[in-house]
Image (cartoon, grey):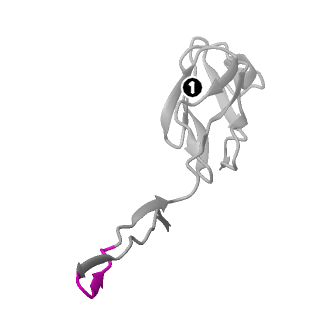
């Protein structure tokens, strides 16, 4: 923490007796500075979503329900230098799909993050190679 002195002025001496002068106490105001308070958003794009109920989250919270393909942004911004980790909390159903995240973790570097990708595939794609 950096502590900066602000408005430090020495008041003039006050005569308190015929040949005695006194300088009143100096009152100094301080201001605390802890760095930038800038915040940045985390988001990206969802593709392939056909089901309902997809929920993604950032850093184990800040849940975001997604109902269709397109761009998304989490509600809670993060400070510069903060870490983000986007995961799928709830996979979509009706139809059942599996969604995965790419470019979902990193550190905020003085800019919004918009390159998180959530890609969903349907059950028929998952099992068409004979796994079921």
Report the residue that reaches farthest toward the front.
18
Q: Quadrant of residue 126?
A: top right
Residue 82 left/right relative to 60: right
- Judging depth in this view, the residue of 115 and 77 nearest the camera is 77
Report the residue that reaches farthest toward the left.
17
Report the residue that reaches farthest toward the bottom.
19
Q: Which residue is mark 1?
A: 91
Kindly tell me whether residue 13 is visible in this rendering: yes
Task: Say which element carries label 1.
Answer: loop
Q: Quadrant of residue 16?
A: bottom left
Q: Residue 100: percent from the left, percent from the top?
A: 67, 33
Q: Residue 1: percent from the left, percent from the top?
A: 49, 66
Q: Is residue 20 above or below residue 98?
A: below
Query: Residue at point 61% right, 12% down?
Result: 95
Report the residue that reaches farthest toward the right.
129
Q: Residue 82: percent from the left, percent from the top?
A: 59, 51
Q: Is residue 27 above or below residue 104?
A: below
Region rendered in magenta: 17-25
Q: Quadrant of the C terminus?
A: top right
């Amino acid at each position: 923490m950096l502590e900066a002195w602000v408005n430090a002025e020495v008041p003039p001496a006050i005569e308190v007796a015929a040949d005695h002068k006194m300088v009143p106490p100096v009152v100094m105001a301080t201001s605390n500075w802890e760095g930038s308070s800038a915040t940045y958003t985390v988001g990206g794009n969802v593709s392939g979503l056909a089901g309902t109920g997809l929920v993604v989250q950032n850093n184990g919270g800040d849940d975001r329900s997604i109902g269709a393909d397109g761009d998304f942004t989490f509600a809670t911004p993060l400070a510069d230098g903060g870490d983000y980790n986007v995961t799928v909390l709830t996979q979509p159903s009706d139809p059942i799909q599996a969604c995965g995240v790419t470019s979902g973790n990193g550190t905020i570097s003085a800019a919004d993050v918009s390159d998180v990708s959530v890609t969903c595939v349907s059950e028929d794609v998952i099992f068409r190679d004979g796994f079921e």
